Image: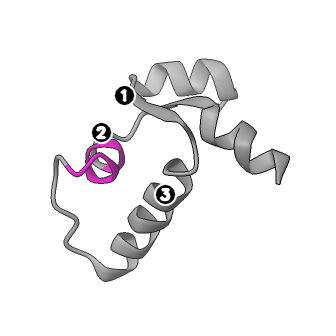
Amino acid sequence: SDQGIVANSAKVQIRGDSLLVINQVLDKWKCNEDRLRVRRDRARSLLSRFGASQLIHHGRENSVRVLGH
């Protein structure tokens, strides 16, 4: 489908304030809990649909500023 072609060439950038989550998704840190491993694997699967992805850690204050909480 056309959507698959677009997604495969799209670039996505994800910013988050959880260094643990970002490094587990990037496979830099181990994930020891089964329930979190399932979520990590799902995130990786979704990211693999894009042509390129970038996960960036930022401080909690940035999340508060952007999200308002």
What's the magenta region? 21-27
> Chief secondary structure of the magenta span?
helix
Secondary structure, mark 3, is helix
Tell me residue 16's x, y (percent): 46, 34
Q: Which image quadrant is residue 35 in?
A: bottom left
Q: Nearer the viewer, mark 1 or mark 3?
A: 3
- Left or right: 1, with 64 as reference point: right
Residue on which disc 2 sits: 19
Q: Which image quadrant is residue 58 in?
A: top left
Query: How far apart are labels 1 and 3 at the CA level?
Result: 16 Å
**Does the CB distance between marks 2 and 1 fall below 8 Å?**
yes
Between discs 3 and 2, the one toward the N terminus: 2
The amino acid type, in three-letter code, at marker 2 is: Leu
Between discs 1 and 3, the one toward the N terminus: 3
Q: Give yes or no for residue 26 being in the magenta stretch.
A: yes
Relative to 29, is 65 above or below?
A: above
Tell me residue 21's x, y (percent): 35, 49
Relative to 6, is 26 above or below?
A: below
Residue on which disc 1 sits: 57
Q: Nearer the viewer, mark 3 or mark 2?
A: 3
- In this view, the residue in front, 2 or 39, is 2
